[in-house]
Image (cartoon, rainbow, N blue to C red):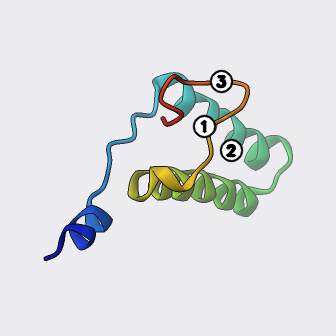
Amino acid sequence: MGLQEKAASENFEVRVSTNALQNIEEITGYIAFVKQQPMNAAKVGDALFSAIDRIARNPFAYRECEEIPTKGKIY
């Protein structure tokens, strides 16, 4: 396995805070119960967790958030 292949297959750790998980639960709960759209709530939840997985696989593919700058320009 070459260096590039190894780097491409390496997953990084994404830490999701308890607060973020609660927010996702509130968002999907609102869509499911208040808006009475449980299928859309499931789609939104799946899309959020898919995005988190994509970040774990390739965090350098995403730009830095301009509102929350970092020293290293990465998260």
Q: Quadrant of residue 47?
A: bottom right
Q: Quadrant of residue 43?
A: bottom right
The correct choice, above or below, for 17 with respect to 5 in the image is above
Residue contact at pointers 1 and 2, CB within 8 angstroms: yes
Label 1 crowd (10 A; few <14 / some 14-19 / many >=20): some
Q: Estimate the x, y position of residue 61 in percent, counting from the top left.
A: 54, 56
Residue tagged by mark 3? 68
- The amino acid on which the numbered mark 2 sits, given as a three-letter code, is Thr
Label 2 crowd (10 A; few <14 / some 14-19 / many >=20): many
Residue at horizontal 75 percent and vertical 60 percent from the top: 40
Q: Residue furthest right?
A: 35
C-alpha gap between disc 3 and disc 2 = 25 Å
Label 3 crowd (10 A; few <14 / some 14-19 / many >=20): few
The correct choice, above or below, for 74 with respect to 68 in the image is below
Residue at horizontal 76 percent and vertical 39 percent from the top: 30
Give whichever of discs 3 and 1 has the lower sequence position: 1
- The amino acid on which the numbered mark 1 sits, given as a three-letter code, is Glu
Residue tagged by mark 1? 25
- The amino acid on which the numbered mark 3 sits, given as a three-letter code, is Ile
Residue contact at pointers 3 and 2, CB within 8 angstroms: no
Q: Estimate the x, y position of residue 5 in percent, counting from the top left.
A: 25, 73
Residue tagged by mark 2? 28
